[in-house]
Image: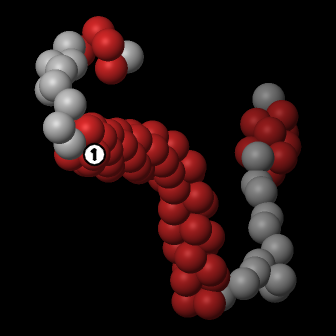
Amino acid sequence: MKMAMANRATSLVVTIDDSKRVTPRLWEPVQLGTALLVRFWWYSKAYGTVLMIGLLTLLSLIFLRIHGTFRKLLLVSIHQGIGGRKWHTLSRKSLD
């Protein structure tokens, strides 16, 4: 019985060969840099989509503002070109 217990105890011993191990001081900056790069990549994909939608919305609003301003200027110049003719009031429906 003692012989069986002794064999079982020796079979649980585990040895690890550390001769090819990279020193932690050199490996930690590489791991940290890789983690930061992966994190930046995923955040840029998510926030890039949101920022592009915001930019598209802003550009659309600027375009609509410029378009509305030029449309009003065009109507004023048409009215001034009429001269002695009778002035007509334009409704919103007639502009569309």
Instruction: Identify which residue is drawn at 51% across, 68% down.
Output: 36
Residue sitting at the far front: 84
Instruction: Identify which residue is drawn at 16% across, 25% down.
Output: 86
> Which quarter of the rendered picture does the C terminus lie within?
top left
Residue sitting at the far top: 93
Task: Say above or below: 44 vs 20.
Answer: above
Q: Is residue 24 left or right of residue 11?
A: left
Which residue type does callout 1 highlight?
A: Gly
Q: Which residue is mark 1?
A: 81
The picture places residue 8, in percent across and down from the top left corner, at 80, 39
**Is residue 49 in view from this perspective?**
yes
Quarter of the rendering containing residue 74: top left
Q: Is residue 48 left or right of residue 19?
A: left
| In front of the other: 16 or 37 | 37
| In front of the other: 24 or 69 | 69
Task: Say above or below: 3 vs 90.
Answer: below
Indicate the secondary structure of the residue bearing disc 1: helix
Instruction: Identify which residue is drawn at 77% across, 57% down.
Output: 14
Q: Is residue 70 left or right of residue 38?
A: left
Quarter of the rendering containing residue 24: bottom right
Instruction: Identify which residue is drawn at 76% across, 46% down.
Output: 12
The picture places residue 46, in percent across and down from the top left corner, at 50, 44
The picture places residue 91, in percent across and down from the top left corner, at 20, 14
The number of callouts visible is 1
Q: Residues within 10 Å of mark 1 (few under 14, many from 20)?
A: few
**Is residue 2 in view from this perspective?**
no
